[in-house]
Image (tube, helix red, strand yellow):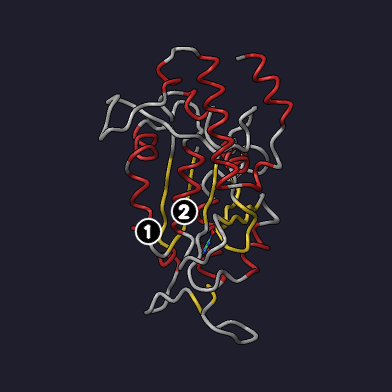
Amino acid sequence: MRLDVVTIFPEYLDPLNVSLVGKARARGQLDVRVHDLRTWTYDRHNTVDDTPYGGGPGMVMKTDPWGDALDTVLADGYETGARGPVLVVPTPSGRPFTQELAVELSERPWLVFTPARYEGIDRRVVDEYATRMPVYEVSIGDYVLAGGEAAVLVITEAVARLLPGVLGNAESHRDDSFAPGAMANLLEGPVYTKPPHWRGREIPEVLLSGHHGKIARWRRDEALRRTTANRPDLIERCDPAAFDRKDREM
Ligand SMILES: Nc1ncccc1[N+](=O)[O-]
């Protein structure tokens, strides 16, 4: 997978050099290219923004630097269709970023991120590139950040860990919270590891029983308990029949 990020804060993307994404880049599984938007400005102040038409607070990012930047990035082997790039625009006014969307994006060969600062990017930029490729306007949450770069880090990590061979144990994202399956839409329950005793706190007996069916049922019940407490909205989306089927398997 190729990932391009156009930003006025390229150093904000340095975390993409470490940990899971960094290792995937080192192994050649990810080709990440970060571009400084100001490269495509030609005035003394490297201007990327201006006041909004219609008035109002803040500044809007201008069309030309983005158009020149995206034309340059996309000129590099650009093609349309399934093998082509998609534009990912992090914005609080986008559709919610979910595990499902992470899976969808992980199946694309090329993501081009356009994180915006200020009040956003002149709408004509998205309108222009939407004529050439799919555009995903995506929000990572209902709060306002100073810019979209943190969202690029979040989206990139969620997508990269789904790429084949990136996560050490391919199974480990099977039971992720929000991963499809009978536990779909349930939050993960509590987890424990050695030592068996810590400050007078023990491990739940069932986890030491070696009885896989009982352990799976306990984990499912704990997941239900945590989901009911923290995300009652997800409980409605559960499929109780899936649990009965799962119970019979355990
Ligand atoms: N929440 C956000 N705030 C600013 C920019 C982008 C954002 N987002 O969710 O992608």
Q: Which residue is mark 1?
A: 10
Question: Going by the image, does 88 lie left or right of 207?
Answer: right
Secondary-structure class at tag 1: helix
Q: Residue at x 42, y 21 (%)?
A: 205
What x and y, as percent, mark residue 234? 65, 43
| Cβ–Cβ under 8 Å for marks 2 and 1 | yes
Direction bottom: furthest residue:
55
- How far apart are labels 2 and 1 at the CA level? 8 Å
Residue in front for this viewpoint, 144 or 166: 144
Q: Is residue 227 above or below residue 96?
A: above
Q: Is residue 248 above or below residue 25?
A: above
What x and y, as percent, mark residue 232? 63, 47
Indicate if the residue with disc 2 has its beta carbon within 8 Å of ligand 1: no
What x and y, as percent, mark residue 141? 55, 57
Q: Which residue is mark 2?
A: 5
Q: Residues within 10 Å of mark 2 (few under 14, many from 20)?
A: many
